[in-house]
Image: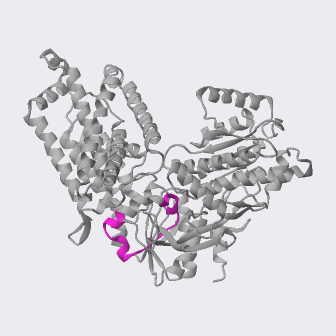
Amino acid sequence: MTTNPSSRRQFLKVLGAGAGAAVAARLDAPPAYAQATGPVKIGVLTIRAGVAAPVGAAGLRATEWWAERVNKSGGILGRQVQLVVEEESNPKDTVERYRKLILQDQVEAVLGGISTGVTLALGPVAEDLGTPWLSWDGTTQKGVEETMPNPKWAFKSVDNEVEAIVAGILTPKHFKGIKTVAGIGNDYSYGHDCWESYQAVLKRYIPDVKFVLELFPKLGVTDFTSHVATIQQSKADLLMCSFWSGDATIIMKQAAAVGLFKTMKGVFTTAGGVHDSLKKEFTPEGLLLGYNTMYFDDPKGSPLLKQFVREYKAKYNEYPPYECDHAFFNAESYRVAVEKASGASKKWPEKAQVVKTLEGLEIESLSGKRSWREDHIQMCNFYQGITTHKNAYDFVTINPIETVSTKQAMKPAGTKLFDWIAGWKI
Amino acid sequence: MQKIFNLACGSFYALGAYVGVSAVGWYVGAGGPPALFIVPLALAGLAVGAVGVVVERGLLRFVYDRDETFQLLMTFAIVLMMEDAIRMTWGTAPRSTAGLYLAYGQIRILGAVAPVYNLIVIAASLAIALGIGWLLARTAFGRIIRATADNPEMAEALGVDMRRVYAKVFTLGTALGTLGGALVIPATAAMSEMGIELIVEAFAVVVIGGLGSMRGAVVGALAVGLLRSIAIAVYPELEMLLIYLIVIVVLVARPRGLFGRAEA
C-alpha cells in the first residue's frame, strides 16, 4: 500500500485532464476506465490543515490500517489496495481534486469527506462522475434538510444532528429537575443544527424547560473566559455544548477554573472526539459526554475494536476517536460490496453493481454492526455516558455507557426533522 | 520600526505555545514541583524567541526595501510554513498542559471566582509593558530604537549599526510573542491555527490603538478585550461586529488610530 500526496505537477495535470474531459466527453457519463487487473486504486479525501485536521488524521490512519489488513489477507478479489490520498480543503479545490482522483488516477471509489460545506459541493459532482463516493463524516444536508434524497453514487454519513438528539434523549434520564438550559456551539451549521435539535427533543421530555442563553463563538476561538462568565451569570441548571475539537478541551479547562460545573450540569455531545485531552484534573465526573459512533474503551467491544485500539495506541500513542470507525466502515463496506457483487465468477464488478450491493449492506465495523440505509445514509450506534475518573487513564471515560441506535435517533428517509420529533410518542 | 506589517507575529505566538507545552511536559516528567512550572514555561517561551534572529537575518532583511505588498506576502508565507512545521513537529491534535492551570488555586474577587494563574499572567503583562516602556524611554538602546524609527537614514549617518538594531528589535518582538504564547497555554490548548486567530485580533488592536504606538497597543488590546467580553455578556451576536464597527469608525475618522502619530 502506498500513499500519493498531490504535487504541483499532478495538480496541473488534473487541470488539463479536467478541462480535456469537459470538452471531449459528457461528465455525466461514467468514465470507461475498467481496471480489472493490477492494484485497485482507492481515492481518499482527508482534511490535513486547520481545526478539523485531527479528525482527518484519524480517518486516514484507520483507512491505512484497513488497507494494510486487506493487503495482508490477499487484497480485494486478489488485487492489492493502493490508496491515493488527496486533501480536503475548500469546496472548489476539493471538487478539483475529486475530479483528479476519478479522471486522472482512475480510482475505483473515493472515501472521505468531513466538512458539510465541502460535501454539499461534492455530492452533485459524484453523481456526475459516476464513481462510488463513501463519505466519512460529511452529509449533503443544508441545515437539517437533505438536498440529495435519491443519490446513485454518493453514500453519506449520519445526519449532523443525531448526537444532539441522542443527548436530548439521555439528558432527562440522567439529570433530574432541569428547568433552565444554556447552550454553546460553534457558529456554523453544525453548531446551530445541534442546538435547535437538542432544544426540540428536550422540550418533548421536559415541556416547561426554558432555554435561557445561546452562544455561538466562531470555530477556532481559544479563549472562552467571557463565554464561561456569561454562562455562569445565566444560572442555568445545565449547559449543552456541541464543541468537538480542541475548543471542547479549552472550555472544559476554563469552566473548571471558575468552578462552573459545581453548580451546573453539563452535556458535551461530541467532546469524545478529543477524549484523551479531557484530563481528570479539569474534567469533572458526572457530565454527559458523547463519543459519536465509537467508544474506544467499550468493555463489550469486539475483538476487532480491541485490536485496532491496541495497534493505534502503539503506533500513534493516542486512543482512536470516532472518525476511525466512519473511515473503517466506509472502506470495509466497499470491500464487502465488491466481493459480494462479483458473485461466483469472482470477476471485478461494474461500479453500478457495487453501489447497488452497498444499499442495505450490513457489515462488522470497529464499533460493531453498521449498515447503509437504502437511501445511502449510514446506520450505526451512538455512544454517550456519564464521565468518570475511575479508570487507568489520565483522562475521563464514561460509565454507564449508553448506546442509542440511529433507528431511534435519526429521522427516517423522506421526513422533516422537527415534524418527526414532534410526532414522537413519549 | 522596520515598517513591516508582520503577519507572522501570530505564528510566533503559536510556536511559543507549543514549545511551552513541551517544556512543561519535560519538566513535570522529570519530577519538577508543579508549583514552579511557570519558570520552565516562561524560560522556554523566551528562549524560542531566538527564532526571530533567523527569520530577520534569513528572510526579512531582503525585503526591507521592497514594496509593502511583497513584505506582506513574505510574512504570510512564514505563517503558512510555520503552521506546517508545527503540525509536523507536534502533530495535529490539540496539546495542553493538563491541570497545571489550577496549580496556584482560585481566588474570589467581587463575588466571582478567578484562577490565580490569570492574575499572575495579568501581572506579568503589566510588568512587560512597563519594562518595554522603560527600555524605550530611559535607556540608550531605547533612544536608538526611537531615533531609527523616526529617521533611519539620519540614525545610520550618525553611526547606528542598522543591521544589529533591526535584528535586536525583531528578536525582542518575537520573544514577546513566543513568551505570550507560552504564558497563555496553561489556560487553553495549543492548536496549529491559533496564530491566525491572533493575527485577526491583533489587526483590530493595532488599528484602534495606532500603528507604532506602545500606549496605543495597550489601550487597543484593553478596548478589544473589554468590548468582546461586554458584547458576549449583553448581546453575544454583536461580539465580532462591535469590534470591527469600531475598527471601521477609527479607520474613517482617525486613520492613524487613537495614539498613532500623523505622518510628517
Direction from residue B217 to residue A316 in the image, left or right: right
Quadrant containing the N terminus of chain A in the rendered view: top right
Above or below: residue A177 compared with residue A371: below
Left or right? Give the position of A31 relative to A175.
right
Where does the image place residue A215, in percent across and percent down from the top left? 43, 63
Q: Is residue A149 left or right of residue A112?
A: right
Q: Position of residue B126 (x, y in %)?
A: 17, 50
The reply to whether residue A52 is in sight is no
Front-most of A384 and A367?
A: A367
Classify residue B35 as left or right of residue A59: left
Q: Which residues are magenta?
A: A254-275
**Looking at the image, is A257 positioned above or below residue B165?**
below
Q: How is the image coloured?
A: one colour
Q: Position of residue A358 (x, y in %)?
A: 79, 55
Report if residue A330 is visible in the image. yes
Residue A233 vs residue A264, the one in the foreground: A264
Measured along the vertical axis of the image, is residue B40 above or below residue B261? below
* Residue at point 25%, 57% (across, down): B33
Assess whether residue A272 is covered by the magenta stretch. yes
* Image point (72%, 55%), residue name: A148
Q: Position of residue A159 (x, y in %)?
A: 64, 61
Which of the 4 image quarters holds residue A402?
bottom right
Is A41 part of what is drawn in magenta? Answer: no
